[in-house]
Amino acid sequence: MRTTLDKFSGARSNVSIIGKYDRIFKRLTHLVASMIFFAGLFLIPVAGRPQTAEPTPSFGMVIHGGAGTISREKMTPEKEAAYRSKLEEALATGYEILKKGGTSFDAVEATIRIMEDSPLFNAGKGAVFTSDGTNELDASIMDGATLEAGAVSGVKHVKNPISLARLVLEKSPHVMLVGAGAEDFAVEYQLERVSQYYFFTENRWKSLVRVKEKVAQEQAKESSDEKSEKMEFYGEKGTVGAVALDQAGNLAAGTSTGGLTNKMFGRVGDSPIIGAGTYANNETCAVSCTGQGEYYMRLLVAYDIHALMAYEKLPLAEAANTVIMKKLKELGGSGGAIAIDKSGNIAMPFNTKGMYRGYVKEDGKFVVKFYEKE
Ligand code: ASP
């Protein structure tokens, strides 16, 4: 028989069992609550974060339409508008290719073709005249991913020399073809050819006459010894170039020109020389130059910018500035360069009064500039 005490102790033991379950239950509740709380700490910010799309890969393009004495005083609003609109058209062409995931190599060729087809630039249609009154065109293109390059020089009947340079890269075992051989190659691949008359523009003809008069005046003044040592820059601003970085991280560069007004027959400038006027290497940057070719060839300007980045580990802007503003200037050369590196940084230094230039990045904003202080 159970005593009161027994009853009481039984009740107590019941109470203690209930209390025990209660404590376990409370602990479990705490544990679950804590788990929910800590999970929340991680989950809430993630859930609360705005949904972001995949980050847009970096891409961009820089172009030039020649460096030289481009001053505000000599510029009319009409001329300025014409240059601006053509440079923007060229940038838009390259941008569309890059935006869709196309290659920097395709973008460079397509962009340069736009400028070659315009009489505004000293390339293709608007090429300057040689001292013989003919037009001899040079161009080159380089793929920074493979280090393959193509170039042509002294062509007289090819409407778009940059495309012939590309053909040399893609369809020949060589890097450079010149003169008659390059023309034959264009015929073989049915590239559009034109008569020399296609390249006639009144503007360029007047420039030739002006330069010839200037040379005659100087020759009258100087002794023949001085003449042979002097290398005047009768550069007609307008050489064109493009450099690009595509979404796959590949760099490419290209340059196209009519050379220098009143140049001697057979003269080859820097534009078709890989390393001098054009260079691209995925490890560092892509470069296209414009200016007094003879100096660019002696300094291997485009390659030197790459080399300063590769060996001295200089950032793009510093490498490009060192070569254009210091080394080129010290040797007596004038001109500029455009460059883009593997991260999409750009540089556009020049030591002349101006340089037609522009760039576009992922945001699709076209920036076009002409003068020194802008
Ligand atoms: N670099 C070109 C050449 O010497 C000319 C220029 O860029 O204006 O042929």
Image (spheres, rainbow, N blue to C red):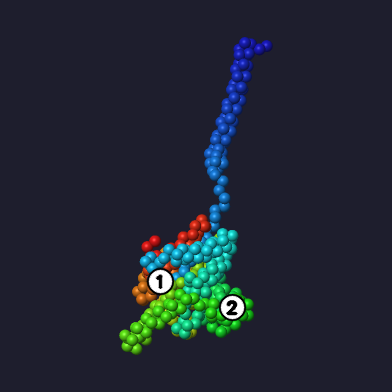
| The C terminus: image quadrant | bottom left
Work out whether mark 1 precedes mark 2 in sequence or the reverse, and give the earlier one.
1
**Number of numbered callouts drawn:** 2
Which residue occupies the foreground of this view, 154 or 286? Answer: 154
Residue for badge 1 = 68
Q: Secondary structure at mark 2?
A: loop
Residue 371 in picture, x, y percent from top left: 40, 65
Residue for badge 2 = 193
Residue 303 in picture, x, y percent from top left: 46, 73
Is 316 situated above or below 45? Answer: below
Q: In the current view of this chain or complex, which residue is farthest to the bottom?
A: 224
Residue 363 in picture, x, y percent from top left: 51, 56
Can residue 33 be seen in this snapshot? Answer: yes
113 relative to 219 in the view: left or right: right
**Few, some or many residues within 10 Å of mark 1 (<14, 14–19, 20+):** many
Which residue occupies the foreground of this view, 57 or 41? Answer: 57
Residue 232 in picture, x, y percent from top left: 38, 80
Is 7 situated above or below 130? Answer: above
Which residue occupies the foreground of this view, 324 or 212? Answer: 212
Mark 1 lies within 8 Å of ligand 1 (Cβ measured): yes
Which residue occupies the foreground of this view, 235 or 200? Answer: 200
Residue at the image point whose x is 68% and y is 11% from the top: 1
Residue at the image point whose x is 48% and y is 71% from the top: 121
Is 232 situated above or below 317? Answer: below
Q: Amino acid at mark 1?
A: Gly
145 relative to 205 in the view: left or right: right
Can residue 231 be seen in this snapshot? Answer: no
Task: Compute the Cα span from label 1 to label 2.
Answer: 30 Å
Q: Amino acid at mark 2?
A: Arg
Residue at the image point whose x is 36% and y is 73% from the top: 329
- Do the residues bearing badges 1 and 2 touch, measured as CB atoms within 8 Å? no
Residue at the image point whose x is 38% and y is 68% from the top: 74
